[in-house]
Image (cartoon, grey):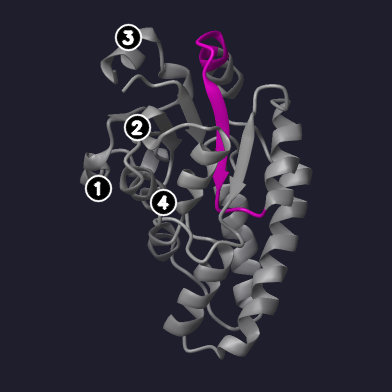
């Protein structure tokens, strides 16, 4: 089936927010007397904040009665950090223009809360490009479950087979592929050589590197 829809993840792909999420987690988890290693943090990127907090609270044996408060604290801290020092990733305007010229339907499917997605859309000045937004925040399951991608496709009135997704996290890639969509991954530099990206249809070092030939290779 012909591709006619593109769906983007947000954190780490459209905005350089993963370091800010990590900072926020470190600040809040410090209140509960534990700290994640970089490797531990990277294994849980792409998860919703609730799942992220619950997972590490169980791992470090912190009472889950504190998890809702910690989740809210992390979201509040990271929102302020993104507003004050978040930077849009290279190639964002280029890639949105690329698909606009192809008359693609464009969506964003993120694990972040809808309010934060709206903030980033405004910061990136891509309001006029985005036709639909879906957040996994209130869904029964987040990434790597495909529901947030399937919801975005439904909002765009597209079938999964018509969708091309862009992701930067392993959990996000699994979500897109589980939803029977094609997936281009743009991993962080320190993860780009990993074999874990083998399920992706294409791997890039930057959104700026995507072009007509690579697009045609996906058809």
Marks 3/4: CA–CA distance: 28 Å
Relative depth, front residue between 125 and 5: 5
Q: Which mark is residue 213?
A: 3
The residue singled out by tag 1 in the image is: 196
Residues rendered magenta in the picture: 98-113
Q: Are marks 3 and 4 in contact (CB under 8 Å)?
A: no
Which tag, 3 or 4, sits closer to the chain's start? Answer: 4
Would residue 109 be seen by someone viewing this image from the given angle?
yes
Residue under the point 43% across and 60% down: 38
x 35%, y 37%: residue: 181
Secondary element under disc 1, as helix, strand or loop, is: helix
The mark lying in front, picked from 4 and 2, is: 2
137 left or right, relative to 60 = right
> Which is more N-terminal, label 3 or label 1?
1
Point out the image quarter for the N terminus: top left
Q: Quadrant of residue 136?
A: bottom right
Q: Is residue 191 above or below residue 80?
A: above
Q: Which residue is mark 2?
A: 161
Q: Quadrant of the C terminus?
A: top left
How far is disc 4 from disc 2 in space, using C-alphas? Answer: 13 Å
Let me know if residue 103 is in the magenta part.
yes
> Residue at the location (38% across, 49% down)?
175
User: Which structural element holds mark 2?
Assistant: helix
Circle 4 sits in a helix, a strand or a loop, which is it? loop
């Amino acid at each position: 089936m012909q591709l006619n829809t593109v769906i983007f993840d947000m954190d780490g792909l459209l905005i350089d927010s993963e370091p800010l999420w990590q900072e926020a987690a470190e600040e809040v988890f410090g209140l509960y007397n534990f700290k994640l290693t970089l490797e531990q943090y990277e294994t849980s990127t792409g998860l919703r904040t609730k799942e992220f907090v619950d997972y590490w609270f169980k791992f470090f044996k912190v009472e889950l009665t504190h998890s809702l408060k910690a989740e809210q604290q992390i979201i509040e801290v990271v929102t302020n950090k993104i507003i004050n020092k978040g930077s849009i990733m290279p190639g964002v305007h280029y890639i949105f223009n690329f698909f606009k010229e192809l008359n693609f339907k464009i969506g964003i499917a993120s694990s972040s809360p809808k309010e934060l997605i709206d903030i980033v859309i405004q910061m990136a000045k891509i309001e006029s490009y985005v036709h639909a937004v879906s957040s996994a925040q209130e869904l029964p399951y987040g990434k790597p479950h495909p529901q947030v991608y399937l919801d975005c496709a439904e909002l765009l009135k597209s079938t999964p087979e018509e969708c091309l997704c862009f992701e930067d996290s392993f959990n996000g890639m699994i979500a897109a592929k589980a939803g029977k969509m094609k997936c281009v991954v743009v991993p962080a530099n320190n993860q780009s050589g990993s074999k874990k990206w083998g399920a992706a249809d294409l791997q890039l070092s930057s959104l700026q590197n995507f072009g007509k030939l690579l697009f045609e290779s996906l058809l």
